[in-house]
Image (cartoon, grey):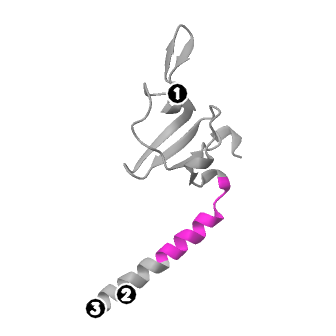
């Protein structure tokens, strides 16, 4: 292996180590969590899908279609700014940050 590639790999490994250290120091509310642990009680959260490399904000587990005031079909992930369920399959979730007036 050439010296340039070896040095680049070492730099990348150090950077990854540093990023992991920073991530462990973050408060729980700003860390991504496995989707299996996400609340399914209507709590609004942010979602991440690795397949599409896409973040969805203000999402929740909910019914999407209603008729005469009654829900139709199964619940699934959705967001207030979209009609119908997601095509994406979220892999991670994160609680919403506190509102500015709550952070002093």
Relative vertical location of residue 9 with respect to residue 97 in this rendering, above or below: below
Tags 1 and 3 touching, CB below 8 Å: no
x and y, in percent, of residue 57 in the image: 50, 39
Bounds of the magenta span? 15-28
The numbered disc on residue 74 is 1
The numbered disc on residue 7 is 2
Numbered disc 3: secondary structure: loop
Residue at 48% x, 48% y is: 48
* Mark 1 or 2: the one toward you: 1
Relative vertical location of residue 101 with respect to residue 49 in this rendering, above or below: above
x and y, in percent, of residue 10 in the image: 42, 84
Of the two numbered discs 2 and 3 on the same chain, state the one appearing first in sequence. Answer: 3
Residue at 70% x, 41% y is: 102
Q: Which residue is mark 3?
A: 2
Circle 3 crowding by C-alpha within 10 Å: few under 14, some 14–19, many from 20: few
Looking at the image, the residue that sits furthest to the front is 73
Of the two numbered discs 1 and 2 on the same chain, state the one appearing first in sequence. Answer: 2
């Amino acid at each position: 292996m050439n010296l340039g590639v070896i040095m680049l790999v070492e730099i990348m490994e150090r950077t990854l180590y540093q990023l992991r250290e920073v991530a462990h120091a973050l408060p729980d509310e700003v860390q991504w969590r496995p989707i299996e642990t996400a609340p399914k009680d209507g709590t609004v959260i942010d979602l991440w899908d690795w397949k599409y490399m896409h973040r969805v904000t203000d999402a929740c587990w909910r019914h999407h279609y209603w008729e005469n005031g009654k829900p139709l079909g199964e619940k699934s992930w959705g967001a207030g700014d979209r009609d119908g369920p997601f095509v994406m399959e979220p892999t991670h979730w994160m609680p919403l940050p506190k509102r500015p007036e709550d952070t002093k």
